[in-house]
Image (tube, rainbow, N blue to C red):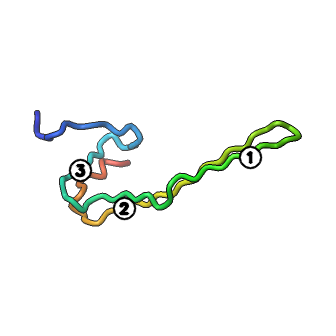
Amino acid sequence: LGTVADGFCVNHRFTDPDAWFLLTDCPDGLKHFVRKNVQRGIEGDFETGNLRYKARERYSYGWSDWRGAYGSPGGGT
């Protein structure tokens, strides 16, 4: 119908088929912060030849203005 300016997308991780959400153009709506950039580590074992690798990063998310998103919880059962 063309009522949503930028079209729409489907998030297949939502479990309720009746739930819907709209993101608005509110400047301080949803927030996402990188709290710690990715840190990598690698270590080799001389005896076995095995290699261990690890990575770690931290994020924080939330909202500052409730008008940033609007939606329906769906029908639910």
Amino acid found under the numbered disc labelled 2: Gly
For the residues labelled 3 and 1, say whether their Cβ atoms are less than 8 Å apart: no
Q: In the rendered image, which residue does mark 3 sit on? A: 23
Q: In the rendered image, which residue does mark 1 sit on? A: 43
Amino acid found under the numbered disc labelled 3: Leu
**Secondary structure category for the residue under label 2:** strand
Q: In the rendered image, which residue does mark 2 sit on? A: 62
Residue 60 against residue 55 in the figure, above or below: below
Alpha-carbon span between mark 3 and mark 2:
14 Å
Q: Residue furthest right?
A: 47
Q: Residue at x 35, y 48 (%)?
A: 76
Mark 3 against mark 1, which lies toward the viewer?
1
Residue 15 against residue 70 in the figure, above or below: above
**Secondary structure category for the residue under label 3:** strand
Q: Quadrant of residue 53?
A: top right
Labels 3 and 2: the sequence-earlier one: 3
For the residues labelled 2 and 1, say whether their Cβ atoms are less than 8 Å apart: no
Provide residue 43's location: percent of width, then percent of height: 74, 46
Q: Residue at x 29, y 66 (%)?
A: 64
Provide residue 7's location: percent of width, then percent of height: 19, 36
